[in-house]
Image (cartoon, helix red, strand yellow):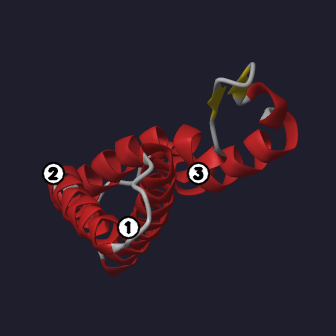
Amino acid sequence: MQNFHYFEILLYVFPVLEIILINQFFRPYLRYKQIIRLSIADVVLPFLLVGIHLLSVYSLTYSLLPHFLLAACIVGLVQTLYFDKRKKNHEPKRFYRYFIKILFLMALLFYYSLVLLRVYFLIRG
């Protein structure tokens, strides 16, 4: 049977808790004047990447973070090709915004698939 750490419970609920807390209390602080505007995905994404690394090491004894980053690079290349094929002008700000949203969605799905994998391994023994 694999060892269970109480720290893992925090890992399981932290992304959802962080999204709720940022949305409720820290939303006005996500901008600097009118120059820089951050979204919730910009703030939560680094924590998801660290969580992907920790959960994959707990579950599989090696990190899946390089594989995830490779998939993110491929998504960025496909998105670049999409923006290149369009006839409209290329706006880096728009590209960045869509890329972060897609990356956030991928990271959240990958993170919770690792959580389900970890719970499965703990139950299976």
Q: Residue at coordinates 28% horizontally, 53% vertically from top-left?
A: 58
Q: CA distance from mark 2 to mark 3?
A: 20 Å
Mark 1 surroundings: few (<14), some (14-19) or many (≥20) residues within 10 A: some
Q: Residue at coordinates 47% horizontally, 40% vertically from top-left?
A: 47
Q: Nearer the viewer, mark 2 or mark 3?
A: 2
Looking at the image, is 32 positioned above or below residue 121? above
Q: Earlier in the sequence, mark 1 or mark 2?
A: 2
CB-based contact (under 8 Å), mark 1 and mark 2: no
Is the N terminus in the top left, top right, bottom left or bottom right quadrant? bottom left
The residue where tag 2 is placed is 66
Q: Earlier in the sequence, mark 3 or mark 1?
A: 3
Q: In the image, 18: left or right of 74?
A: right
Q: Residue at coordinates 80% horizontally, 37% vertically from top-left?
A: 27
Could you tell me the amino acid type at mark 2? Pro
**Mark number, residue 60:** none
Q: Residue at coordinates 49% horizontally, 66% vertically from top-left?
A: 105
Mark 2 surroundings: few (<14), some (14-19) or many (≥20) residues within 10 A: few
Residue that sits furthest to the top in the current view: 33
Label 1's element?
helix
Q: In the image, 8: left or right of 63?
A: right
**Mark number, residue 110:** 1
Q: CA distance from mark 3 to mark 1?
A: 12 Å
Could you tell me the amino acid type at mark 3? Pro
**Mark number, residue 15:** 3
